Image (cartoon, grey):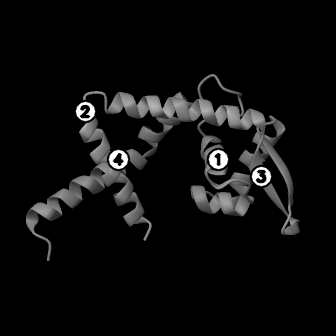
Amino acid sequence: MADTSSRNSSRRIAEALGRVVRRRVRAPLYADLTANLDAAVNPATYPVVSAIDRLGPSSAAALADEVGLDRSVVSRRAATLVAAGLLASGPDPADARAVLLDLTDRGREAVVTMRERLDRAVDAATDEWTDEEVETFARLFTRFVDGLGR
């Protein structure tokens, strides 16, 4: 059985994680990441663009699973991004009945900008940390997130 100190640490981690995933923290971050980009790239469509960048060409169903949204919501957001020229839609080579979504060159440019902004946000949040603290956090946080996925 975990001792009191370990349970308290677990509770603190859970509370901090809860703050990160709450809309009031996510929304301003997504707004900063998408500011002054193509109007189709906004806090609502950011998760779709980001997921396609991570996964590569994907179906709306796969994207919905990745971002935790309903397939119909992902399809509507993807349609907005396709209309804006940020995503391309085409047949799945493995199943001509299925449609895959992928980033266009404009979409990739938007992702590069958003990733640079996210890097700057992380740098700002850890600005007063030592290099060793940042490295330790990166290693342990990655391990923690990997553990949540099991």
Q: Residue furthest left?
A: 4
Label 1's element?
A: helix
**Residue reaching furthest top?**
36
| N-term-proximal mark, 4 vs 2 | 2
Residue 53: mark: 1
The C terminus sits in image quarter: bottom left
N-terminal of the two: label 1 or label 3?
A: 1
Q: Is residue 150 above or below residue 45?
A: below
Tell whether label 2 touches label 1 (CB within 8 Å): no
Q: Please tell me which residue lies in front, 51 or 65.
A: 51
Q: Residues within 10 Å of mark 3 (few under 14, many from 20)?
A: many
Which residue type carries mark 4? Answer: Ala
| Residue for badge 3 | 101
Asked whether disc 1 touches disc 3, contact meaning CB atoms under 8 Å apart, the reply is: no
Residue at 28%, 35% (x, y): give it.
131
| Label 1 vs 4, first from the N-terminus | 1
Q: CA distance from mark 3 to mark 4?
A: 31 Å
Report the residue at 60% width, 46% height from top.
47
State the CA–CA distance, disc 1 to disc 2: 29 Å
- Give coordinates of residue 61: x percent, y percent: 70, 63
Instruction: Please identify the quarter of the rendering in which residue 35 is found.
Output: top right
Find residue 31 and report its horizontal and vertical position in percent: 54, 31
- Amino acid type at circle 3 is Leu
Residue at the (65%, 59%) spot, across then down: 64
Element type at marker 3? strand
User: Which disc is residue 138 wearing?
Assistant: 4
Q: Where is mark 2, residue-wise?
A: 129
Circle 4 packing at 10 Å, graded few (<14), some (14-19), many (20+), is few
State which tag comes first along the sequence, 3 or 4: 3
